Image: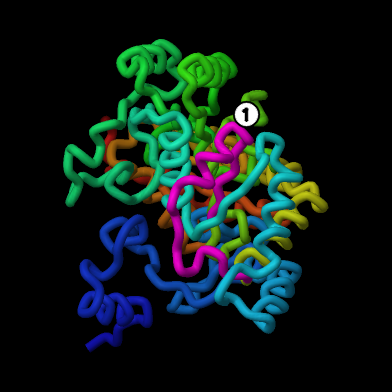
């Protein structure tokens, strides 16, 4: 009998003690065939799976890693705080220091609150908007992802109609659709919730148009509602002041997580003074929300992002990767479509039903040491240097050549 690999053995053990073997976006059913489930370490922009294979990582832990795994400055700050204490009877001084830093960094922010994950932050934004406006309806883009609890989860299992009774949908970047949604709830609009950009799973990504962003701001103002930007996925990768700084539109409230502490569990809500009283009035809490280690890591992360010109570094590397892969796809006659900001790319193939070609490309790249995803937003970090990009392009050239030779994919 052939011995199981360490990854396969872990999966078998997990199946006995964890429903379905894993949950959520990392569930076994969502991991493409040939991909590892378990990882044992990370360093810089590389990860090692339980079988001992290493990869140049373009998922960055699904977004949280932005400075590189084990960044020495972040780890030193976290280690100092570990010696002092993490979860104590009350917050550490890092809470105030981090709030001050975020307010100094983010132009729209007059205050900040902290929690542990993106769903905490988006939910708090919605709750604060309702408390501040005394209204109920929230406009949400159809297909957008804002978290994993009943009011916003993409799954309807265990969700009742009542959980979403006050959610009204519109089409991202469609001003007419947004206007119609706002008109349908006139007098009861608490907030317009927008993503940093349209990053729906398996779809071409779209940056917000200037027309759409300005219209959202104007409609929120006219309705005395909050404009909320969900910057959980994109925060600190596009602009340190918030992703909608790129279109010159500032929200009333914003949700942050993922890259905020270079991989440690932390989320934040930032807001303006209009919603300060509402933010103080709601009851939202968690046993670990004021723990100091993640906050120390966040202070170090934001400080380093500001001092290292991180946005420019990630943009340059992302453009180098995009240009190189596009040239390779054209060389092999492949209908590759790239979209999203270059720091957060998605690769799709024209007419690729069920991501058959995309998965084949990603699996071939995986075999050679590059970890991509066939349908989800990917991420670059400051650890993805030009030399790493060039190493990656050698891998993608081989992977795309194989895809071009495969004729048994499923076109539309």
Q: What residue is at 61 percent from the left and 48 percent from the top?
A: 112
Q: Is residue 196 magenta?
A: no
- The image quadrant where one finds the N terminus is bottom left
Residue 94: x percent and y percent?
69, 65
Residue 361: x percent and y percent?
43, 49
Range shown magenta? 267-292
Q: Residues within 10 Å of mark 1 (few under 14, many from 20)?
A: many
User: Compared with residue 97, is residue 315 higher up or lower down, i.e. above or below?
Assistant: above
Residue 149: x percent and y percent?
31, 50
Q: On the rendered structure, is 37 left or right of 251?
A: left
Q: What residue is at 25 percent from the left and 78 percent from the top?
A: 12
Residue 220 visible (yes or no): yes
- State the image quarter where residue 17 is shown: bottom left
Which of the pair 270/119 is nearer the observer?
Answer: 270
Check disc 1 and report the residue beneath it: 250
Q: What residue is at 33 percent from the left and 80 percent from the top?
A: 10
Residue 191: x percent and y percent?
44, 29
Counting the numbered discs, the total is: 1
Q: On the rendered structure, is 353 left or right of 231?
A: left
Residue 383 visible (yes or no): no
Determine the residue located farthest toward the right in the rendered image: 307
């Amino acid at each position: 009998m052939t011995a199981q690999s360490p990854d396969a053995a872990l999966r078998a053990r997990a199946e006995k003690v964890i429903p379905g073997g894993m949950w959520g976006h990392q569930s076994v059913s969502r991991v493409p065939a040939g991909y590892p489930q378990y990882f044992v370490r990370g360093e810089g922009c590389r990860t090692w799976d339980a079988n001992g294979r290493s990869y140049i990582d373009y998922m960055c832990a699904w977004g949280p890693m932005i400075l590189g795994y084990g960044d020495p400055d972040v780890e030193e700050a976290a280690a100092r705080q570990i010696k002092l204490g993490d979860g104590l009877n009350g917050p550490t001084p890092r809470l105030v220091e981090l709030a001050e830093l975020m307010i100094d960094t983010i132009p729209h922010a007059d205050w900040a609150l902290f929690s542990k994950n993106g769903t905490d932050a988006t939910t708090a934004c919605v709750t604060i908007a309702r408390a501040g406006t005394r209204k109920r309806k929230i406009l949400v883009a159809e297909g957008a992802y804002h978290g994993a609890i009943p009011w916003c989860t993409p799954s309807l299992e265990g969700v009742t109609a009542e959980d979403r009774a006050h959610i009204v949908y519109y089409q991202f970047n469609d001003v007419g659709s947004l206007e119609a949604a706002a008109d349908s709830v006139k007098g009861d609009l608490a907030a317009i919730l927008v993503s940093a950009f349209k990053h729906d799973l398996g779809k071409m990504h779209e940056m917000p148009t200037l027309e759409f962003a300005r219209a959202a701001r104007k409609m929120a103002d006219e309705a005395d509602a909050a404009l909320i930007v969900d910057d959980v996925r994109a925060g600190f990768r596009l602009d340190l002041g918030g992703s909608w700084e790129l279109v010159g539109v500032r929200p009333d409230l914003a949700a942050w997580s993922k890259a905020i502490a270079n991989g440690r569990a932390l989320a934040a809500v930032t807001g303006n003074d209009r919603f300060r009283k509402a933010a103080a009035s709601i009851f939202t809490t968690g046993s670990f929300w004021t723990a100091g280690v993640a906050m120390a890591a966040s202070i170090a992360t934001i400080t380093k992002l500001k001092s290292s010109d991180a946005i420019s570094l990630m943009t340059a590397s992302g453009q180098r990767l995009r240009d190189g892969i596009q040239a390779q796809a054209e060389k092999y006659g492949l209908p590759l479509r790239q979209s999203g900001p270059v720091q957060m790319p998605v690769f799709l193939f024209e007419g690729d039903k069920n991501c058959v070609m995309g998965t084949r490309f990603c699996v071939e790249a995986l075999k050679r040491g590059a970890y991509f995803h066939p349908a989800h937003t990917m991420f670059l970090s400051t650890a993805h240097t030009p030399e790493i990009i060039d190493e990656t392009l050698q891998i993608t050239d081989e992977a795309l050549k194989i895809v071009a030779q495969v004729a048994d994919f499923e076109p539309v």
